[in-house]
C-alpha cells in the first residue's frame, strides 16, 4: 500500500531538564531554561508535562524567589487548559497574593472563576485586569475589555434567576455556598453538602444545578425517591439540563444495582465545549512587554501564539524529519522537487549550550519549507561535540532558527554571545510535522 504525508502543526517535544547543583549563576541559567521548557510544553499542548515541570521547580524554589509568580502563572494556565478550574483558581490566587499588579493574573483568575460559575468574582477579577491595563492598547487588553463586558451581562442574567430583589452581596454569598457544596461533594461528604444545597434550594432561586447536585447527594445515600424528585425539579426549571436528565434516566438501574454508584458533580459554568483562552505575558520595569503567550482551546483543538525570540524577521517553515527511510526529494506539501541548500542552524542543546551548525538540508522554494533529517543532524552534532564537549553527546536539543551565513562565518572566528546571536536570529515561521496516512486504492 502506498503512503502519503499529512501535515499537522506541532512543536517538538523535549525531555525533562535535569537539575544539578551548580554556582548561583548556573542555577539561574538552568532555571531560566527550565521555565522556557515549561513554556514550550504549554505551547505544544503538553499541559500535564507543563504541570509536572512547574511543580518540580516550585518545590525546589525559595518562596521569595522573583521567578515564583511566573511559574505559578504557567502552572495555573496549564491547569486551566486541562479544565482543573479549582486548581487554576487557587494557583492564580496565590500569584495575585505575591504580585497583585499583574493584569494577566487577575484575568486568568477571572477565567477560572467563570468556568467554576463564580460570576460575581469573575466580574471583579476582570475589572482589576482592565484597570491595571488602562494605559495598554494591545490586542490582549481589548480582549480583557470585551470579556468584562460579556461577564457583566452574564452576571446580570444569572441574578435574574434569583429574583428581582436579590442584591449583588446576596448573590455572591450564594455563589460561595454552592462552591462549598461542590467541594464537599468531591470530598464525598454527602450529608454536609446536602445541608448546604437544601439552604440554596430553599431560596427563590430558579437554578437547575442546585437541584441536580442535591439529587446526586440523595442518590448516593440511597434515598432514591427524594433524588428522583430533585432531578425532576431541576428539569422543570431547565428541561434541557443534561446533568439531571441523564441521572434521572439512570436512576432505575441504580436502584437495583449492587455496584458502587459512580457520580460526578457539576458547577454553574457552561459545558466542556466552550472556547477557552488563557493569556500570560511579562513586562519589564519600564512597562514594555518582554514576552507574551496566548493559548486558545476550542474542544480538542489548541492554538498558541508567542513573541519570537530572534530580532530578525521569522523565515521558513521547519520540519524535523524522523523517517529514516524517506529523504523527501519531493515536497510533502506541493509534491514539487526539493533541492539541497546550505543552512546555518541555531540549536539549543540542553542544559545550557547553544551552537550554530552548518548543514545541507532539503528545501522547497515553493512552500518555503526547510527539511532537516533528524538522524543526519544528530550524527553531525555528535561529531562536533566529541572533540570539545563530549558530555553533550546524546542530550536533548531544539532547532530554534537560522542565521545568515555571513554571521555564521563571524561566529567561527569568535563565538557569538547569546545577546548577539539573538540580534541575528531568524525564528521559524512555523514548526510542522507530517504523518503517514494510507492511500485508499
Image: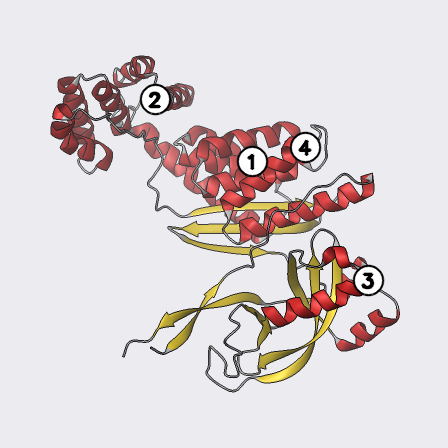
The residue mark sitting in front, 1 or 2, is 2
Q: Is residue 29 visible?
A: yes
Q: Quadrant of residue 158?
A: top left
Q: Which mark lies nearer to you, 2 or 3? A: 3
Q: Nearer the viewer, mark 4 or mark 1?
A: 4
Q: Which residue is mark 4?
A: 60
Query: Which corner quadrant holds the C terminus?
Result: bottom left
Say which of 340 and 258 sits in front: 258
Vertical position of residue 314 compared to residue 219: above or below: below
Relative to 194, is 280 above or below? below
* 73 displayed left or right of 211: right
Residue 303 picture location, percent across and down = 48, 56
Residue at the image point whose x is 25% and y is 29% from the top: 208
Mark 3–mark 1 distance (CA, rounded to whole Å)? 48 Å
Residue drawn 67% across the image and 45% down it: 18
Given the current orientation, which residue lies at the most extreme right position?
414
Dividing the picture into quadrants, the one containing residue 401 is: bottom right
Number of the front mark, 4 or 2: 4
Q: For numbered disc 1, what is the local secondary structure?
A: helix
Q: Is residue 131 shown to the viewer in this render? A: no
Label 3 vs label 1, nearer the camera = 3
The residue to which callout 3 is attached is: 388
Q: Residues within 10 Å of mark 1 (few under 14, many from 20)?
A: many
Q: Nearer the viewer, residue 159 or 390?
A: 390
Q: Nearer the N terminus, badge 4 or badge 2?
A: 4
Give whichever of discs 4 and 1 has the lower sequence position: 4
Q: Which residue is mark 1?
A: 106
The x, y position of residue 235, in whole percent, is 17, 31
Amino acid at each position: 500500500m502506498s503512503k502519503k504525508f499529512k501535515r499537522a502543526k506541532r512543536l517538538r517535544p523535549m525531555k525533562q531538564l535535569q537539575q544539578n547543583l551548580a554556582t548561583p549563576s548556573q542555577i539561574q541559567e538552568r532555571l531560566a531554561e527550565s521555565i522556557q521548557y515549561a513554556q514550550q510544553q504549554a505551547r505544544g499542548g503538553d499541559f500535564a508535562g507543563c504541570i509536572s515541570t512547574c511543580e518540580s521547580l516550585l518545590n525546589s524554589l525559595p518562596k521569595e524567589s522573583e521567578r515564583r509568580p511566573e511559574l505559578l502563572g504557567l502552572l495555573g494556565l496549564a491547569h486551566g487548559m486541562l479544565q482543573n478550574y479549582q486548581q487554576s483558581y487557587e494557583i492564580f490566587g496565590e500569584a495575585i497574593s505575591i504580585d497583585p499588579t499583574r493584569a494577566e493574573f487577575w484575568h486568568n483568575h477571572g477565567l477560572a472563576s467563570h468556568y467554576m460559575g463564580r460570576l460575581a468574582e469573575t466580574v471583579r477579577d476582570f475589572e482589576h485586569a482592565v484597570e491595571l491595563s488602562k494605559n495598554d492598547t494591545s490586542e490582549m487588553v481589548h480582549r480583557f475589555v470585551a470579556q468584562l463586558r460579556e461577564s457583566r451581562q452574564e452576571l446580570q442574567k444569572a441574578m435574574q434567576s434569583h429574583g428581582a430583589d436579590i442584591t449583588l452581596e446576596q448573590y455572591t454569598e450564594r455563589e460561595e455556598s454552592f462552591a462549598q457544596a461542590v467541594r464537599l461533594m468531591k470530598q464525598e461528604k454527602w450529608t454536609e453538602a446536602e445541608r448546604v444545597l437544601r439552604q440554596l434550594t430553599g431560596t427563590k432561586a430558579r437554578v437547575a444545578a442546585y437541584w441536580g447536585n442535591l439529587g446526586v447527594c440523595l442518590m448516593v445515600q440511597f434515598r432514591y425517591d427524594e433524588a428522583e424528585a430533585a432531578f425532576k425539579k431541576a428539569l422543570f426549571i431547565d428541561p434541557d439540563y443534561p446533568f439531571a436528565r441523564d441521572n434521572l434516566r439512570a436512576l432505575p438501574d441504580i436502584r437495583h444495582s449492587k455496584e458502587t454508584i459512580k457520580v460526578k458533580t457539576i458547577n454553574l459554568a457552561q459545558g466542556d465545549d466552550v472556547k477557552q483562552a488563557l493569556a500570560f505575558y511579562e513586562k519589564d520595569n519600564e512597562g514594555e512587554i518582554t514576552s507574551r503567550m496566548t493559548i486558545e482551546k476550542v474542544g480538542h483543538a489548541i492554538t498558541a501564539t508567542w513573541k519570537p525570540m530572534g530580532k530578525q524577521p521569522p523565515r521558513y517553515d521547519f520540519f524535523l524529519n524522523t523517517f529514516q527511510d524517506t529523504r523527501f526529494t519531493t515536497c510533502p506539501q506541493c509534491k514539487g522537487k526539493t533541492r539541497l541548500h546550505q543552512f546555518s542552524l541555531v540549536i539549543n542543546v540542553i542544559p545550557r549550550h547553544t551552537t550554530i551548525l552548518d548543514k545541507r538540508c532539503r528545501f522547497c522554494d515553493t512552500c518555503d519549507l526547510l527539511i532537516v533529517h533528524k538522524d543526519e543532524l544528530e550524527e553531525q552534532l555528535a561529531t562536533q561535540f566529541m572533540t570539545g564537549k563530549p558530555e553533550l553527546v546524546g542530550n536533548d536539543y531544539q532547532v530554534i532558527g537560522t542565521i545568515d551565513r555571513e554571521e555564521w562565518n563571524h561566529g567561527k572566528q569568535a563565538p557569538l554571545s547569546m545577546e548577539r546571536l539573538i540580534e541575528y536570529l531568524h525564528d521559524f515561521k512555523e514548526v510542522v510535522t507530517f504523518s503517514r496516512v494510507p492511500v485508499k486504492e
